Image: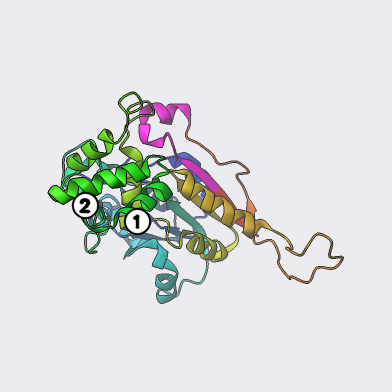
Amino acid sequence: MEFNHKSVMLDECIQGLDIKPDGIYLDCTLGGGGHSLEIVKRLRQGRLIAVDKDEEALASAKQRLKEYEDKITYIHDDFKNVIERLDELEVDKLDGVLIDLGVSSYQLDNGERGFSYNADAPLDMRMDRGQYLSAYNVVNEYEEEKLADIIWKYGEDKLSRKIARNIVEARRKEKIRTTAQLAEIVENSYPAKLRWKFGNPCKRTFQAIRIEVNEELKDLDKVINRLSLRLKISGRICVITFHSLEDRIVKRVFVELNKDCICPPHQPICTCDKRREVEIITKKPMTASENELQENSRSTSAKLRIAKRV
């Protein structure tokens, strides 16, 4: 299957990065390579470091970007480990960082990957298929209370307790092996009159399990902080989020880095030595244009926040 992925808010990201032809740029989430392609097109003596934990994404993107391979360094890893990988490459400072936290269209549309509730497929949801933990393990092995906590914390579903209870009851009879089985359990956990009121009732549970499997929120705040501080003066960081949990984390990190002095308000002299480290370019997150929303429904929930190193 071809690795197709419509890059969300592509123009806004490229403008936000303010690309310099001789700069060093980091694409933390390579995916289909759309953002990377537009970055590397603008480089002359510059360099792009492209990271993805999905080997299929890397292989496909390498083909798409082969014309520019002399300017690109590929890394197969979770981007949360990228600081250590930058140290190995002896890359001290960056001109720009892009993080697109969305799941790629390929992963959603490729049935065998088990991300989507719209296709019957084995429960998987691993972005890195070399890891052990999969959606199958979460659904069939986690205790009821832990399952409920995950669905509430990462999916913000008010029926998390009932959904978890129904999952546990169903798996006592037989293992839950497919996305269709899980989707049916989740759907039946909702009262009929509310089931489709806010779109597909499975969306929040599938999102929650995917986040758990791939540890998507673990240390996200730390890596955004460290990458922001890795920028050269005037370097930019662009982060695209797709749900409120991610967006809150990004907003909080940028706000903390933007603070100039954190001493108590009544203290007459600053003793904290805290100085503003970034300027927030997007006071409110940017969202997709009307044209993009019509062309790519997956951009509906996207939010882009941009900060500049000072």
First reached walking from the N terminus: tag 1 or tag 2: 2
The residue most toward the left is 174
Closest to the camera, between mark 1 and mark 2, is 1
Q: Image point 63% across, 59% down: which residue?
A: 257
Residue in the foreground of this view, choosing between 264 and 94: 264
User: Hey, what amino acid is under mark 2?
Assistant: Asp
Q: Is residue 176 left or right of residue 92?
A: left
Tag on residue 201? none
Q: Residue 223, percent across and down?
A: 48, 63
Q: Secondary structure at mark 1?
A: helix
The residue most toward the right is 268
In the rendered structure, does residue 295 fall within the stretch colored magenta?
yes
Residue in the foreground of this view, choosing between 116 and 296: 116
Q: Image point 29% across, 36% down: which residue?
A: 189
Q: Is residue 306 left or right of residue 58?
A: right
Q: Residue 286, percent across and down?
A: 54, 39
Q: Quadrant of the C terminus?
A: bottom right
| Residue ID for mark 1 | 146
Relative height, residue 276 to residue 198 (above, below): below
User: Hey, what amino acid is under mark 1?
Assistant: Lys
Q: Is residue 292 left or right of residue 144?
A: right
Q: Quarter-wise, where is residue 178 in the image? A: top left
Residue in the foreground of this view, choosing between 162 and 77: 162
Work out whether residue 68 can be spotted.
no
* Colour option used: rainbow
Q: Which residues are magenta?
A: 289-305
| Residue ID for mark 2 | 124
Q: Image point 46% across, 27% down: which residue?
A: 290
